[in-house]
Amino acid sequence: MKNYIKGFFMSFSMFTIIPLPFNPWDDDGAKYILTFYPLVGLVIGLLWYLLFKILLFVNTPVMIFTAAMMFLPHIVTGFLHLDGYMDICDALLSRRNREEKLRILKDSHTGAFAVICLGLIFIVEYSAMGTLLIKNSNMEALILIPILIRTMMALIMAKMPILKESSLVAFFVKDIGKKERLLIEVFGIIASIFLIFIMGVKGILFIGILIGIVMIFVRNAYKELGGINGDVAGYGLVIGEALSILLLSIM
C-alpha cells in the first residue's frame, strides 16, 4: 500500500504542475506511476469543470472564456504533452526514413511542421470549445474526458512495444502486471459508464469514435517509428483531447 501511495503522488508530480508535498524519487513507487495516470486525468477534469462553472458564473466574455477553457489542461500539465505532440508531428511529416525520423525526434530544435501542427490543433481546440460553450450541453463530460484519454495512453504504453531509446517509459512499464493493468482498465470503465449516463447512447458512439481515431494516429506513429515512447503518448493524448472537444461540440 505504501508503494501505491508513493506512485500516486509521483504520478501527479511527473504529469502536472500541481504543488504537492515533497516526495523523493522511489523506484518501488515509480512502477505505479502509470497505474494512477487516469486519476491525474480526474483532477484535471474536475479543475476543467470548476473553471467552466466559475467563468460562466461571472459572465466572462465568450472569446476569453473559450481561450481559458482551451488552455487549462495544457497549463495544468505544464505543456508536457504538447511538447511530445510537436516532436512527433515534426518527425512523421518529414517523410524521411525511420532512422532520420528518430534523429529528428531527438533534436531539440523546433521544426516548421511542429509549428504548423501546433497552430492547427489550437484552431481545432478553440473553434470546438467555442462551439461547445455556446451549445452548453453535456459539460459534465469535461470531468471524464481526461480520465478516458489517460487510460488509453497508459494501456498503450503498457501493451505496445517500446522504442529502445525510450528508457524512461520502459522503466515505467517493466513491472506493470495484470493487477496494475486491471486497475487502469477499471478507472477507464468507470469513466465510460458515467459518460454514457451523461450522454446516453451518444456516449457509446463518442467512446467508439474517440478510441478508433486515436488508435489510428498512435498505430501510424508506432509503424513509422518502430515503437512508442513518451512523445507518442503525448501525441495521442493531445489529439484525443482535441477530438473529444470536437465530438462534444457536434453531438
Image: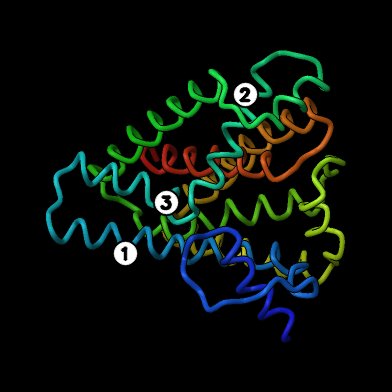
Whether label 1 touches label 2, CB < 8 Å = no
Between the C-alphas of marks 2 and 3, the distance is 22 Å
User: Which x, y percent locates residue 128?
Assistant: 36, 36
**Which is more toward the observer, 223 or 83?**
83
- Pointer 2 residue: 90
Which quadrant holds the N terminus? bottom right
| Residue most extreme to the top | 95
Name the residue type under label 2: Asp
- Pointer 3 residue: 75
Name the residue type under label 1: Leu
- Pointer 1 residue: 50
Q: In this view, does 96 lie above or below 251?
A: above
Name the residue type under label 3: Ile
Mark 2, secondary structure of its residue: helix
Q: In this view, does 71 lie above or below 193?
A: above
Mark 1, secondary structure of its residue: helix
Q: In the figure, is residue 29 to the left or right of 65?
A: right
Which quadrant holds the C terminus? top left
**Which is more toward the observer, 56 or 175?**
175
Q: Residue at x 26, y 45 (%)?
A: 133
